[in-house]
């Protein structure tokens, strides 16, 4: 069967699927390593934000590898909307902490069995739990409980000679504190617990990754988070890096892209990583089908419409179809508004409902991560080039 197949497609369009060549993230990678090496004297917390498909998850995976190479033990998870309350975030932290404790002690057992008890000398963490606990004097029971779980994990990680414990939470924008005091405050809980350990110079590091709303959520949770986190805003790739993302996977394949094709793909994709992978994958398949060993302008011309159709199906349609009918109608109505930004005043001109209705629906669209609020009465879509997509979509319906 393998003889029949050509070489494997070197592009990786998908969610969280690492590309063959990770382009244009060198500065972030360098800063991340520097932050880790300054820990625990300086708290190593990083906030990574960006639009859909911009490459947050694959960057997170890459940073995890870098941290592991520096001796950190890493736990990376994707936060789910169901974690957005005090009890569930506490459960999640407990689960992760205990899994970490188990992981390191299993590793030690294995080492002891293989190498003998002589290698079993362990280090001890310098700070005792009661020193941390004192900072919770006067309330904060659940914060203290979470901090204790985290402490146990950090202590275990230390004993087993790791540099520290790195906790990485993807899709962290789903954690949002309620504004009233009696509501739930999952984000504050997590941060206060991590902060308590870091103040005692325990080597725990937190990376939170998500949509741009993560930043506002953090600010609302605790004002000091602005100083607690190093912010990394991940965006589209600049032209040279976008070109690299497109061209580098072709190295060693015997397939080449004509310079005109490279600049056209860079223009069309506007440097958005997912789009670059999708265009590359489509061009690759088409070139293999046609039995040509290069990406040329005629090849692009022949498949451009198909690429957009594929893009709509793979990347956009699902986002609209996951919504309830009223939400879908509203999103489609925004196609007729000027953009960017999306102004509620403009949306009013497109719908027959009142302000209350619009506010509720915009709130729901924000919660579902379709849009995010940039300022009062102004929003942006979380997916790049979403407005163009919506226009294509209503165009298709209207010409049917
Ligand atoms: N720096 C990069 N260079 C080349 N390709 C990249 C880069 N970053 C991401 N990609 C590609 O882009 C696609 C999307 O990446 P990823 O899933 O990490 O995005 P994301 O920001 O996590 O999206 P979402 O918000 O939907 O979770 C993948 O196909 C990945 O291979
Ligand atoms: Mg992701």
Image (cartoon, rainbow, N blue to C red):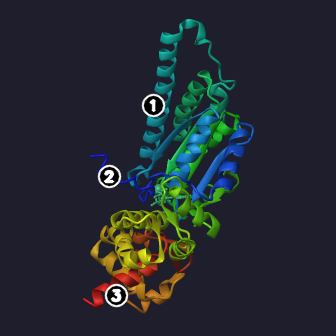
Q: Name the residue tied to disc 3.
A: 395
Tell me: residue 216, above or below residue 164. Answer: below
- Position of residue 269 measured from the top left corner of the image (x, y, whole percent): 51, 72
- Position of residue 173 measured from the top left corner of the image (x, y, whole percent): 50, 58
Q: Is tag 3's residue or tag 1's residue first in the polypeptide sequence?
A: 1
Residue 38 sits in quarter:
top right
Quick check: can you spot residue 230? no
Query: Residue furthest toward the bottom?
Result: 349
Q: Secondary structure at mark 2?
A: loop
Using residue 254 as the reference point, say whether residue 395 is left or right of it.
Answer: left
Q: Is tag 3's residue or tag 2's residue first in the polypeptide sequence?
A: 2
- Position of residue 308 measured from the top left corner of the image (x, y, whole percent): 39, 75
Query: Which image quarter holds the C terminus?
Result: bottom left
Q: Name the residue tied to disc 2.
A: 5
Of badges 3 and 2, the one in the foreground is: 2
Residue 87 sits in quarter:
top left
Q: Name the residue tied to disc 1.
A: 99
Is the residue at mark 1 in contact range of ligand 2, meaning its CB lies under 8 Å from it? Answer: no
User: Of residues 169 and 363, which is closer to you in this image?
Assistant: 169
- Taking the spot 50% from the left edge, 88% from the top edge, the residue there is 338
User: Of residues 57 and 14, which is closer to you in this image?
Assistant: 14
Using residue 379 as the reference point, say whether residue 334 is left or right of it.
Answer: left
Q: Secondary structure at mark 3?
A: helix
């Amino acid at each position: 069967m393998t003889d029949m197949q050509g070489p494997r497609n070197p592009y990786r369009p998908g969610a969280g699927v690492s590309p063959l060549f990770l382009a244009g993230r060198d500065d972030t990678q360098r800063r991340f390593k520097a932050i880790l090496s300054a820990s625990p004297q300086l708290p190593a917390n990083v906030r990574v934000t960006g639009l859909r498909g911009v490459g947050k998850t694959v960057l997170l995976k890459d940073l995890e590898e870098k941290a592991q190479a520096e001796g950190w033990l890493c736990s990376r998870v994707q936060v789910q909307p169901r974690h957005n309350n005090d009890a569930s975030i506490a459960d999640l932290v407990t689960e992760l902490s205990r899994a970490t404790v188990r992981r390191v002690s299993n590793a030690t057992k294995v080492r002891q069995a293989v190498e003998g008890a002589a290698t079993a000398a362990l280090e001890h963490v310098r700070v005792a739990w009661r020193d941390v606990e004192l900072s919770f004097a006067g309330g904060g029971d659940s914060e203290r409980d979470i901090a204790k779980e985290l402490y146990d994990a950090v202590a275990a990680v230390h004993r087993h000679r790791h540099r520290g414990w790195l906790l990485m939470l993807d899709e962290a924008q789903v954690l949002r504190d309620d504004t009233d005091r009696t509501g739930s405050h999952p984000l504050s809980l997590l941060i206060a617990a991590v902060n308590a350990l870091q103040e005692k110079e325990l080597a725990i590091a937190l990376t939170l990754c998500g949509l741009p709303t993560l930043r506002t959520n953090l600010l609302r949770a605790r004002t000091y988070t602005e100083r607690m986190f190093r912010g990394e805003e991940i965006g589209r790739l600049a032209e040279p890096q976008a070109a690299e993302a497109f061209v580098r996977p072709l190295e060693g394949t015997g397939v080449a892209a004509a310079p005109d094709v490279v600049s056209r793909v860079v223009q069309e994709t506007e440097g958005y990583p997912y789009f670059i992978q999708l265009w590359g994958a489509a061009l690759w398949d088409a070139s293999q089908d046609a039995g040509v060993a290069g990406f040329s302008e005629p090849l692009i011309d022949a498949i451009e419409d198909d690429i957009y159709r594929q893009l709509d199906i793979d990347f956009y349609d699902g986002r609209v179809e996951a919504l309830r009918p009223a939400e879908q109608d509203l999103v489609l109505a925004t196609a007729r508004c000027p953009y960017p930004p999306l102004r509620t005043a403009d949306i009013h001109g497109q719908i027959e409902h009142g302000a209350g209705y619009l506010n509720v629906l915009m709130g729901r669209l924000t919660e579902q991560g379709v849009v995010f609020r940039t300022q009062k009465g102004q929003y942006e879509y979380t997916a790049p080039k979403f407005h163009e997509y919506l226009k294509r979509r209503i165009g298709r319906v209207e010409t049917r």
